[in-house]
Amino acid sequence: MARALFSWWEKEPWLPLARALHRLGWDLVASEGTAAFLAQHGIPARTVTDLTQVPPILGGRVKTLHPRIFAGVLARDPDTDREDLARVDALPFDLVAVSLYPFQQVVRRPETDLATALEHIDIGGVALLRAAAKNFPRVTVLVDPRDIPQVVSELEARGATEEATRRRLALKAFAWTATYDQAIAGYLAGGPVEVLTLFPGLELRYGENPHQGAALLTWEPGTGPLGGQLVQGKPLSYNNLLDLDAAWRAVSRLPQPAAVVVKHASPCGLALGETPADAVRKAIEGDPVSAFGGIVALNTPMDAEAARALQGLFLECLAAPDFSPEALEVLSRRKNLRVLRLPEPARGDDVQYRTIFRGVLRQQADPGDPPGTQWRVVTRREPTREEWEDLRFAWLAVQPVLSNAIVLVKGRATVGIGGGQPNRVDAVRLAVQRAGARARGAVLASDAFFPFPDGVEEAARAGVTAIVQPGGSIRDEEVIRAADAHGLAMVFTGVRHFRH
């Protein structure tokens, strides 16, 4: 009988694994707290104490550190090692899944003292991960719940995981424990607790220009670019990856179905549609000139109609969560088009790193408006129902555009974008110029406040009817008076969304 060992601090994300292995008839063994959690969900599991006959000691500091546990994990071949296993009355484990004590999260809290930090250094869990990873030719090790679907799929299909999968998961486990240990060392040294362990991910032909060397490094070894899979086309370039990252982050924050066109790391078209094809067409129509040679991302699976909507437009890359067989057949006629399957949306809780001269900057990715954000109408006129719909979309659309960022939206699609400008009024002029006649009746979103009324006046002259912006300028009253003078509706969000 196949056997699994569980020890989880964070338990909920691992329930699908326990349910799947129980359904497949596995023998489940878990640390006491994890076993109690599984029992609450109707999943039987023996405890580590049942196997070792030694209850946890030292206030739980010692639970899994026992020869019967580690012999079962480290046994290379249960038959060859039968005599040694019998000597300590140990049973072999085929899968080990561990969630470590949350050391990094705990020491970020300002109230955490040294004693509390030390109690949140995981010993047994790290040892189990390293033992299982060392023995990956036989044992499957899991440290990341996102790997559960692949493992369960392989177990259901063939009764065991593939060696390539076990090797990838072992590499991830070693990377996980290396980062964990470096975070502890950084804390004790009085330094940062977030430490990146980077691994070679992809050798690139060159960087931004042909005379610059480049490579993709990753802290999730064994995964494809952006965690996805290149299903068609030439290898991705440095610039492709930057643009794909911008496109995927942008489209991931939009409702479905939505499409985004990116050129030089900034969106030039964003749109919601009734269908994927409708979204694609509207995003391209937002700025068809800039769309040439760009990257298109769709946040819903691409069908054949959406693939055909791209015909006639030269593109570098295309990204979507999945592609229908018919869509892939249409896309296969474009041999130079790089097609990337990205099953996981970009998350707002990701950490972003950027290098500067002799240093690295770290920040949380912009998750959008914080919970509890309240918009307020500050002008005499309130937006109409149609304007409210477009203002909500415009506010999402402006956030991935380079600052200073201005977007004009009509029918839940951008018709003009001005970004990356050193002053806001020029960003308005650029957005209006690109929109042309389509600016009349459009709404406008600004990623930060208007420092002067001039941007509002430029928008009004072009026919814009409503504006959404953070507010907070010392000249807000002047800006509001300008909007009222032109009959515009204006909404303040109280939240800024710069993207440098």
Image (spheres, helix red, strand yellow):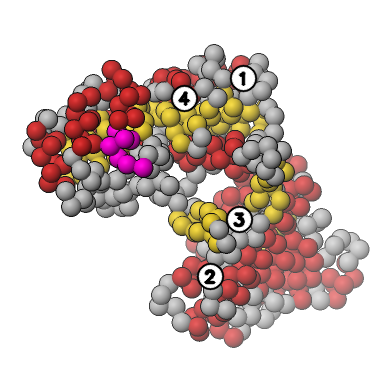
Could you tell me how far apart the alpha carbons at marks 4 and 2 are, in whole angstroms? 41 Å
Determine whether label 2 and label 1 are within 8 Å by CB. Answer: no
Q: Is residue 321 above or below residue 120?
A: above
* Local SS, label 3: loop
Could you tell me how far apart the alpha carbons at marks 2 and 3 are, in whole angstroms? 23 Å
- Of callouts 4 and 1, the N-terminal one: 4
Residue at 29 percent of width and 33 percent of height = 428
Q: Which residue is mark 4?
A: 290
> Closer to us: mark 4 or mark 1?
4
Could you tell me how far apart the alpha carbons at marks 4 and 3 are, in whole angstroms? 40 Å
- Residue type of the residue flagged with mark 2: Pro
* Local SS, label 2: loop
Q: Which residue is mark 3?
A: 144
Q: Residues within 10 Å of mark 3 (few under 14, many from 20)?
A: some
The stretch drawn in magenta includes residue 270: no
- Residue type of the residue flagged with mark 4: Ser
Which percent across, then down, holds residue 207?
65, 41
Q: Residues within 10 Å of mark 4 (few under 14, many from 20)?
A: some
Asked if residue 395 lies left or right of residue 376, the reply is: right
Determine whether label 4 and label 2 are within 8 Å by CB. Answer: no
- Of callouts 4 and 2, the N-terminal one: 2
Determine whether label 2 and label 3 are within 8 Å by CB. Answer: no
